[in-house]
Image: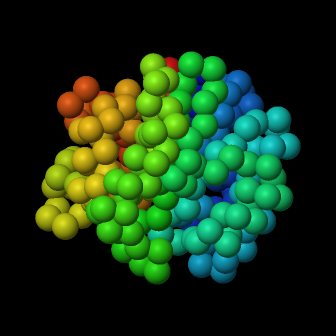
Amino acid sequence: MKILAISDIHGDRKFIKKMAEKGAREKVDLVLMLGDIIGWDGNVEGFVGPFKDKGLDVALLPGNHEGMAEIGFMLEKYKAMDLHGKAIVKGDVGIFGCGYGDIGPHELDDEQFFKMLKKGHDKVKNVKKRIMVTHVEPNDCVLSMKVPGWGSKGVRKAINEFKPMVHLCGHIHETHGIEEKIGETRVVNVGKTGFILDI
């Protein structure tokens, strides 16, 4: 299964058009949009449509810049898949996730992150290949720049307990494109890079 994962678009529709072309060229099976999709103007048009126009499936979750009203519009209008506290199975791959951030108007605490991830994981726990997706990064790691208070202990706990093959996130712009290992889990800040995962 081939996935194109992006986050932290912040309203950049030119980037979305490039990513839709990349997704079609790479023949991806799924596009994952991991939050902070819209810009400050709140306009939700032009983010999912370009991928759908290329015949690509899209799954998304909110970041700290949008709420479920904006996400709900995109889910309904474009028939995208919701990953916030939910899970999807495509072939032999199970994907579960939790959106929102650790700051801003849609802030979750560590316990809420873990509970939402557990809710999704429970639906795919028997799937061999599991991918966990969040907007926020785990704490105490390279992706959170080892800054005290940055990242989520709840996300880190979910990695340690559920042991997904891969965890994809975004949020911290300075570490976009960087990856590391937490236990046996490959952890990647996909950011605004057009990250391709072949699993």
Q: How is the image coloured?
A: rainbow
**For the image shown, how many numbered marks are present on the structure?**
0
Is there any visible trace of residue 169 in the rendered image?
A: no
The quarter of the image holding the N terminus is: top right
- Name the residue located 30 percent from the left edge and 62 percent from the top edge: 111
In the rendered image, is residue 70 in sight? Answer: yes
**Horizontal placement of 185 versus 67: left or right?**
left
- Between residues 157 and 182, which one lies in front from this camera angle? 157
**Residue at the image point whose x is 85% and y is 43% from the top:** 53
Quarter of the image for residue 112 reads bottom left
- Provide residue 68's location: percent of width, then percent of height: 62, 68
Q: Residue at x 64, y 51 (%)?
A: 82
Decide: is 169 above or below 199: below
Name the residue: 70% across, 24% down: 27
- 12 and 169: which is toward the camera: 169
| x then y, percent, for residue 29 | 68, 28
In the image, 38 versus 75, the foreground residue is 75
The one nearer the camera, 22 or 157, is 157
Does residue 30 appear to the left or right of 79 in the view shown? left
